[in-house]
């Protein structure tokens, strides 16, 4: 109360002295419990009485406690420690947990506009999640007869492509959730698929039948088949879609030239176990491969690069185990980072400028099968055998 309003109770009485707390720091930091004084208890009550409006500002109409005193700004600042978090993205929270799959989550990718995340699972479904807000699971697409092993968006975001252990590749309309086309031709599990980044709408797929198939989506059929004696576990186009990279069970990467389709493929050798994932950098100069020898390798795949040994770097940190899952590898949007799936249940991300492991993020309780980067913000999504999907923001 205002000292001027306190009247003496008897002749010669003086107004009571204001309370001075001998442990003011404890009161400010921990509340009345640390001090034990009645006045500090009053201060604590005052702090709890402060109401917040929708925009996060203090509601001045309610800044009073039971004694009727108003909170001056200096006292309010002392009582309430508002933490200002330096957020890096538009995610609802720094880390978001997406649950809904009833089987292991094997794959996922953000849409080109960054608003949607599509994930595929052993439960034969593709789930569509909103990236922003509360990450609503707004769509589910069914049509495959077995586990979905890889999924990718068309470069303009109008279609979604998946491959499955049911020996097929499917084309989906994410707006309606309907399957537009089922591409049949493989005679065994289709382990991987990828689409062209621009130009002619090509799609490539690789399977346990040892074939790498090139599909022309304009005519909706296979236009060429490249054969190999071992299973194909991962495939991708180069940047202009003139070459196809196929990672094989025999530890090699086969490079097929789409302009000379009957020519023998160039072979990249270096891994000592099966190659489970590969991805071409956004600038088209480098190929990253993840293999069961517990290494991630970076290759120079520029068409006229000299020398026989195209392997530039060997990165360690991601591991494989007895599960023998198809652990993928992905470049970030500007090739500044590289993420690889790992059986150690961690999300492993390398800084490609420093060529060192930048993040090892825990949280999953199963093998991390794939990690994908958001196209516009420092956000990643990780798909795991624990059936969960995490979305989180990186520091930069």
Image (cartoon, grey):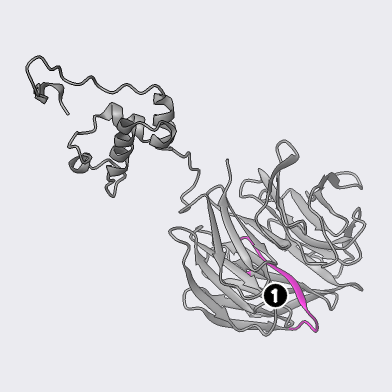
Residue 343 locus on image (x, y percent):
77, 59
Question: In the picture, residue 245 is in which quadrant?
Answer: bottom right
Magenta stretch contains residue 188: yes
Report x, y in % for residue 313.
Answer: 83, 43
Residue 258 seen in render: no
Quadrant of image for the N terminus: top left
Residue under label 1, please give it. Answer: 215
Residue in view at x 35 percent, y 29 percent:
78
Image location (x, y in percent) of residue 197? 63, 60
10 Å neighbourhood of mark 1: few (<14), some, or many (≥20)? many
Quadrant assignment, res 206: bottom right
Instruction: Looking at this view, name the residue that lies furthest to the top.
Output: 12
Which of 317/11 is in front? 11
Front position in the image: 53 or 347 = 53
Magenta span:
185-201
Residue 99: % across, % down? 56, 67
Looking at the image, residue 91 lies above or below residue 181: above
For residue 316: magenta? no
Side of 203 relative to 131 (left or right) = right
Left or right: 265 as drawn, with respect to 36: right
Instruction: From the viewer's side, name the closer residue of 264 and 135.
Output: 135
Please say whether residue 135 is visible from this viewpoint.
yes
Q: Residue at left 61%, top 84%?
A: 143
Quarter placement of the C terminus: top right
Residue at 35 percent across and 23 percent down: it is 21
- For this view, does 172 lie left or right of residue 242? left
* Label 1 SS: strand
């Amino acid at each position: 109360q205002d000292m001027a309003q306190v009247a003496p109770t008897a002749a010669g009485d003086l107004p009571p002295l204001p309370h001075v707390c001998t442990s003011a720091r404890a009161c400010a930091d921990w509340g009345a419990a640390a001090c034990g004084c009645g006045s500090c208890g009053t201060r604590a009550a005052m702090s709890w009485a402060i109401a917040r409006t929708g925009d996060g500002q203090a509601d001045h109409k309610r800044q009073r406690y039971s004694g009727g005193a108003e909170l001056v700004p200096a006292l309010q600042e002392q009582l309430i420690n508002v933490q200002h978090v330096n957020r890096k993205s538009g995610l609802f929270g720094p880390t978001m947990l997406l649950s809904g799959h009833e089987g292991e989550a094997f794959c996922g990718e953000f849409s080109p506009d960054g608003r949607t995340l599509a994930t595929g699972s052993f439960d034969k479904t593709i789930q569509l999640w909103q990236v922003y807000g509360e990450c609503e699971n707004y769509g589910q697409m069914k049509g495959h007869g077995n586990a979905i092993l890889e999924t990718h968006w068309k470069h303009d975001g109008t279609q979604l492509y998946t491959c499955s252990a049911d020996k097929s590749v499917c084309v989906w309309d994410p707006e309606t959730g309907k399957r537009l086309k089922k591409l049949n031709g493989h005679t065994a599990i289709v382990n991987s698929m990828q689409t062209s980044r621009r130009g002619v709408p090509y799609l490539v797929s690789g399977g346990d039948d040892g074939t790498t198939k090139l599909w022309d989506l304009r005519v909706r059929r296979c236009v060429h088949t490249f054969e190999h004696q071992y299973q194909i576990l991962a495939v991708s186009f180069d940047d202009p879609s003139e070459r196809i990279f196929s990672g094989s069970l025999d530890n090699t990467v086969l490079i097929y030239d789409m302009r000379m389709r009957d020519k023998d493929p160039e072979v990249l050798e270096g891994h000592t176990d099966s190659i489970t994932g590969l991805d071409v950098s956004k600038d088209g100069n480098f190929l990253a491969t993840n293999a069961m020898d517990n290494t991630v390798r970076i290759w120079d795949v520029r068409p006229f690069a000299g020398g026989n040994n195209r392997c530039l770097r060997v990165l360690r940190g991601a591991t494989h185990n007895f599960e023998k899952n198809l652990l993928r590898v992905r470049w970030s949007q500007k090739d500044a980072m590289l993420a690889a799936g790992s059986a150690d249940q961690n999300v492993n991300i390398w800084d490609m400028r420093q060529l060192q492991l930048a993040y090892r993020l825990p949280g999953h309780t199963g093998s991390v099968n794939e990690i994908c980067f958001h196209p516009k913000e420092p956000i990643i999504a990780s798909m795991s055998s624990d059936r969960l999907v995490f979305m989180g923001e990186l520091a930069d």
